[in-house]
Structures are given as C-alpha cells and as structure tokens.
Amino acid sequence: MPVRVQITCSLEPSNYPPLKAFLAQNLPNVRGFEGCERVNILFDETQSKMLIDEDWQSIKAHQNYMEFINNNGVLEKLTAHFSEPPKISYFYNGNL
C-alpha cells in the first residue's frame, strides 16, 4: 500500500551549509532506492526545522531503506546534523 512518509527534524542553525551539501550528495541515492517514488526537502529556518516529505510504495520499502542507511553509516552522518532524534510519521490514503 502506498505511503507518505514525513520526517520532522530539529536542526542546529550552524549546520545548514554542511547539511545542504550532504543532502545534495545523498538525495540521488534515496530517489533511486527500490520503492521510493518521491523525496522533497523543506526547511523552516526560523524554527530550525527540516521536513523530509517522501512517497514510498510501502512502509516496508521505507523501513528497508532506513535499515540500509543505518547499516552503511549514512543515517549516523545525517542525524549528526540534528539537535534531537527525528520524528517519523507514516500516512496513507483512507479512501474517504
């Protein structure tokens, strides 16, 4: 079942330039991962927040990706830019 994944991240303001460089380098890998349909990155610099807004073919596909980046060290490098752990939410169409 298709799922929208939203990851809310609190950032250290001084981390914006290195974070943006990291994302530019790594976003093609996310977009090319099996099951990923779309990834957008949105910033609210006044509140030091970043929203990772993604569409995946399933929760399992997203979880496979998260396991992959956890195992290869990319997740640790990404979260080093955060001031607290990210909050991951899964949303699906309720067909209402």
Image: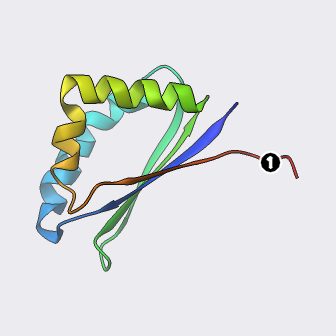
- View extreme (bottom): residue: 46
The tally of labels here is 1
Whole-percent x, y for residue 47 in the image: 32, 77
Give the amino acid type for the residue marked by disc 1 in the picture: Gly
Q: Which residue is mark 1?
A: 94
Q: What residue is at 11 percent from the left and 67 percent from the top?
A: 14
Residue at the (21%, 33%) spot, across then down: 74
The quarter holding residue 73 reads top left
Q: Is residue 2 visible?
A: yes
Colour mapping: rainbow
- Seen at 75% across and 46% down, the residue is 93
Count residues near mark 1 (Cα–Cα under 10 Å), then give few for <14, some for 14-19, many for 20+: few
Residue 70 place in picture, x, y as percent: 27, 30
Q: Quadrant of the N terminus?
A: top right
Snapshot quadrant of residue 2: top right
> In this image, 75 relative to 66: left or right?
left
The structure residue drawn at horizontal position 15% and vertical position 58%, both measured from the top left corner, is 17
62 displayed left or right of 68: right
The residue furthest top is: 34
In the rendered image, is residue 32 in sight?
A: no
Name the one closer to the observer, 43 or 88: 88
In-image side of 46 versus 1 (left or right): left
Q: In the figure, 28 relative to 11: above or below? A: above
Q: Position of residue 72 (x, y in %)?
A: 21, 23
| Mark 1 secondary-structure assignment | loop
